[in-house]
Structures are given as C-alpha cells and as structure tokens.
C-alpha cells in the first residue's frame, strides 16, 4: 500500500474530530438531529482550517445508511465512498477549473436526476469564488429552489468575491484560525499514533509557524519526520523551516526595550548568519509586540495562543514600556516591514529599524518633560501657567468682543437640580438632598473647582480649560464657550481623552454625570487678550517656560 500523508490519513471523519471549530460542529449537529437542514451551505475560512472536511462530514451525516445522523458510521459503502471522494451522489467540483457558464448549465441539467444510492445528491463546490459572474447568475434560480433531493455545499477563502445574491441563499459558517495550543495538541496526538517523539517546544514551534492552519502543520510534521526520523526537537524545526525561536524574539525585544543597541544588533547578526529569513523574523517581532500590547490590556486573552513560558516574558516586558510607546514601536516596525519587502538588502533595513526604535524609546515625551520640570522645582509639582492662575483666582463671566453692538443678552437660565460638592457648599446638601440653585453661579464655582483639580502634568488640558468661558448648565450638559481665536484650545480640550478626563472631574466634584458641550462664540474674546496687550512677551515669565529655557539652554524666537 502506498504511503498516505498525515493531512489525509488524519483527516477528520466526524464532527467531534474537527479541531478548533466547535461553533460550526455544534450548529451542524443540531441541524441534523432536529432535521432543520438548509438547501445550501457556505463554509468560509483561511486555508487548512477544515472547510472541505466539514463539508464531507456533513455529506456523510446525510447519506449514511443510518442517517441522517450526527455520528456517521464510516464503514458503510456511502461513508467510505464519500471519504474516498468517489461517491456518485456527492459530486465535488473545483470552482477554479469549472467556472464557466457551460459547466453550471450542465450542473443544472444533472440536478433533476435522483441520487443513485444515497438519500441526497450533494454538490460540493470548492473555491466557489472563482466562478464567473455569468456562472453565478446561471446558478441563482437552481440554488434558490433546488429539488428536494439536492443539497449544495460551497467552500471559499474569499467570501467578498461571491455575489451577494448567492450569499443570501446560503447558510454561512465562518471557520476560524485554529489556536496554536490546539494545533500542538493535535500534533502530539499524531506523533503518539505514529510512535514519534515530538518535543512540546517543537510542536509549539510548528503550530506557530502554521499560523492557524492545521493542514499546514500536519504537512510540516510530515516533512520533519522524513528529515529527522523518530525524534523531533525544536532545533530541527527551526533549522528546517528557517523559523526563529520565540525565546530569541523575546530576547531581541527585551534588548530593545532596555536600550541595549549593540546587543540587539548583535543578536540580529547572529540570526542572519544562521540563515534565518529576515522577513519572517520581522513578522515574528511585530507579532510579539502585538502580543505584548494585548497582554498589557488583558493578560488572559493569550492563554490559547501563547506558550506559558512566553507569557512570563511578556509579563516582564510590560513593565518596561507604556502602551503609547508600544503602539509607536509597532507602527515603526510595520513601516520597516513594508520597505523590506522590496529591498534587496533586508538586513540593512532591519538594523536601521532597530536603531530608530531604541532611539525613539530614549526620547522624552512632552508630558515627561513637563513632569520633570515639576520635579525640578523641588516641591514635586510645577506651578500652573499664568492663564490658569487668572482663571483660578477669579472666575469671570464671558466678555463680549468690544464693539459688538446689538449683541443679544443671554436668556436668564432656568434653575436646575444639581448636587454640588464644589467649594462653598456644605457636605450635607450633597449627601442628603438635591436643591434648587442658580445654574450660572454654580457652574462658575464648579468650573473653578475643576481647574484646581487638573494636575501640573496635564498643562495642555489646564491651559485649554482656562481659556474657556462658562456658559452655564443645560440639563446634563455643561456648556463652555471659546472665542474664535481660541478654537485651537477648544480642539485640544475636545479630544476624546481630554473630554473624558474633564467629565470625570466634573463627576468627582458634583456627584453627577455630565456631557461637556464646547462651542465657538463670535461674541467672546480670548481671556489672554488683556495680558497680551500689557506685555507681548508675558508668556516668557511663566514658571514652566522659564525653567524649560534654563534646562535646555534655549532661546525664544518671536
């Protein structure tokens, strides 16, 4: 008997044999058990995840002599013929080579005939997206109203190329990429059956290299058995396929995060001299940084895909980098990967990318500079800019632009019920009851308290908030106005992060939830206008600016 490759020998034969597709197998088993069978099914997913295998299992479930059943026997003539691909009642068609209108017309003629032995005549069209538009259109009517003895099963890797009119006539099942841990377990199962010693680290390396495709992993294991014999180690996997070990990628990332440029470049040279694929290494590095990003957000999200040892490395590296810097790092390497695709010297671009990444990690951000200036003052905090002092010392009503004749006065606000914890209100009023207050007066005092709670590290937010005119309260809306010249300030305060920060402060002060409403009002004048008229270079005297000039030996250009 001729040799049978692992991908065919260990092909799933029942729904329970499917790996990593529980959502699909459960739905199909329930449909068969309850006799709720559709006339057309569409299986979608990347290569090697089990689309055609699932279609054959469904065909066996329908045409088994004991069926319809969720557990086809696998020994009757119908089951064996379907598994072997030579059943007269299960017609497998390659959509790539039978994609013309004539092929579909012939199919339409044949569907009228009853099945030869089975219960149903089943048409299984693989890579159905390769059919021409004319062929799709020729199939529409038959697909929508086929004879009772006919079932259609389609499989495709590119569902976006299938006509919407075809999709609407099918039940669609999306098969997912299989987690690396499940692939590694299945490889160990095959190794046990074949009496092969497969190291766990080697199985995981194969699973990671297969990128979610079980068939690819089985083919790789087949190749390794031919190369290594009965014992397969991780080094064999790395040498045969040019992969880089996860530990090496982790070490490279750690050296970059610690700013060890010579060590990081040296490790890259070692991998290059060992014949490793630089594009593959770059992809592995980006994937590791992605895992690090996900781990920082939700550590348990990687339990199925990442080896426990790698998770320990991720936990250590999360302490070395912030989320913002990590996002920048991923963007930098993604750009470098795009350059490497077309560059003859891929190693050069990789080296440059590593050096630039380490340099960017060593550069201080603006927030870090402001925080450092605050520490240099000796009391651990920087004093607010002059504009913030003005707003904090005396909240002022919105000023009209000089010469704005005929400006309509603001309507008298309607009292609102607000629980206030701002300065000037007793704690019992907040805890015991809400009371009727003057919204204009309260809104000014609330905003005064907000300005006082903005920390020195958020100088941009504080300056932008100081430029705002309090327009009052409208229901749950806290209304702020900006002069036309301060629109940039409004844009800074209106970003999602800054808006959420200010709304949180409003909630802390008042105990109520607020929505910040920002508008530009032509009748308002910038709050800093008067100060600017008195002294054009007044901003140079602000403490933060003076300390920045002294620290960096800088000069102001006007």
Image: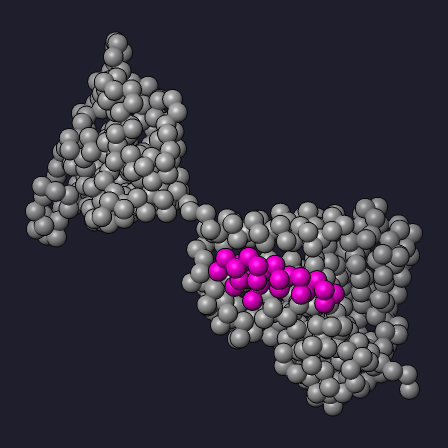
Placement of the N terminus among the 4 image quadrants: bottom right
Residue 39 seen in this snapshot = no
Q: Looking at this rendering, what residue extends furthest in the bottom direction? A: 195
Main secondary structure type of the part rendered in magenta: helix
The location of residue 152, given as percent across then percent down, is 77, 63
Residue projecting furthest to the front: 553
Q: Is residue 51 left or right of residue 467?
A: right
Residue pictured at 61% horizontal, 59% vertical: 265
Position of residue 23 relative to residue 139, above or below, is below
Frontmost residue, 80 versus 534: 534
Residue at 37% of width from left, 29% of height from top? 555
Q: Is residue 276 left or right of residue 539?
A: right
| Location of residue 551 in the rendering, given as x and y in whole percent from the top left corner | 34, 40
Is residue 550 located in the magenta-colored stretch of the structure? no
| Res. 132 visible in picture | yes
Q: Residue 117 location in percent, x, y?
A: 86, 77
Q: Is residue 145 left or right of residue 375?
A: right
Span shown in magenta: 251-275
């Amino acid at each position: 008997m001729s040799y049978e490759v692992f991908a065919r020998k260990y092909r799933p034969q029942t729904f329970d044999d499917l790996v990593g597709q529980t959502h699909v197998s459960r739905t199909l088993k329930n449909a068969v058990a309850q006799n709720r069978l559709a006339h057309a099914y569409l299986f979608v997913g990347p290569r090697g995840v089990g689309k055609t295998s699932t279609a054959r299992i469904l065909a066996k479930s329908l045409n088994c002599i004991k069926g319809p059943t969720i557990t086809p026997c696998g020994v009757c003539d119908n089951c064996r013929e379907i598994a072997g691909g030579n059943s007269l009642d299960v017609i497998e068609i390659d959509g790539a080579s039978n994609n013309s209108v004539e092929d579909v017309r012939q199919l339409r003629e044949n569907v009228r005939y009853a099945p030869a032995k089975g219960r149903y005549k089943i048409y299984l069209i693989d890579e159905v997206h390769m059919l021409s538009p004319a062929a799709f259109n020729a199939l529409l009517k038959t697909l929508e109203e086929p004879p009772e003895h006919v079932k259609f099963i389609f499989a495709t890797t590119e569902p976006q190329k299938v006509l919407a009119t075809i999709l609407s006539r099918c039940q669609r099942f999306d098969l997912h990429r299989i987690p690396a841990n499940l692939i590694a377990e299945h490889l160990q199962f095959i190794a046990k059956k074949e009496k092969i010693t497969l190291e766990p680290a080697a199985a995981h390396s194969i699973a990671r290299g297969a990128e979610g495709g079980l068939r690819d992993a089985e083919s790789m294991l087949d190749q390794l058995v031919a190369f290594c014999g009965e014992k397969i180690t991780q080094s064999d996997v790395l040498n045969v396929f040019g992969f880089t070990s996860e530990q090496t990628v982790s070490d490279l990332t750690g050296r970059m995060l610690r700013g060890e440029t010579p060590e990081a470049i040296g490790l890259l040279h070692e991998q290059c001299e060992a014949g490793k694929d630089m594009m593959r290494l770059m992809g592995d590095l980006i994937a590791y940084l992605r895992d690090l990003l996900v781990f920082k957000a939700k550590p348990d999200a990687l339990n199925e895909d990442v080896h426990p040892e790698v998770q320990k490395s991720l936990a250590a590296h999360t302490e070395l980098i912030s989320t913002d810097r990590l996002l920048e790092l991923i963007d930098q390497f993604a750009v470098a990967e795009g350059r490497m695709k077309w560059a003859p010297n891929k190693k050069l671009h990789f080296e440059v990318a590593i050096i630039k990444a380490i340099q960017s990690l060593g550069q201080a951000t603006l927030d870090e500079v402001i925080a450092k200036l605050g520490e240099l003052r000796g009391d651990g905090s920087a004093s607010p800019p002059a504009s913030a002092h003005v707003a904090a010392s005396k909240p002022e009503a919105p000023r009209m632009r000089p010469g704005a004749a005929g400006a309509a006065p603001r309507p008298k606000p309607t009292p609102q019920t607000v629980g206030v914890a701002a300065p000037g209100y007793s704690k019992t009023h907040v805890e015991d009851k809400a009371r009727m207050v003057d919204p204009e007066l309260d809104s000014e005092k609330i905003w005064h308290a907000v300005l006082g709670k903005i920390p020195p590290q958020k100088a941009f937010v504080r300056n932008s908030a100081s430029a705002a005119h309090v327009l009052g309260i409208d229901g749950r809306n806290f209304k702020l106005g900006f002069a036309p010249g301060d629109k940039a300030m409004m844009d800074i305060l209106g970003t999602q992060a800054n808006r959420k920060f200010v709304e949180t402060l409003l909630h802390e002060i008042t105990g109520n939830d607020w929505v910040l409403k920002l508008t530009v009002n032509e009748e308002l004048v910038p709050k800093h206008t008067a100060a600017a008229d008195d002294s054009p270079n007044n901003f140079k005297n602000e403490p933060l600016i003076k300390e920045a000039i002294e620290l960096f030996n800088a000069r102001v250009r006007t």
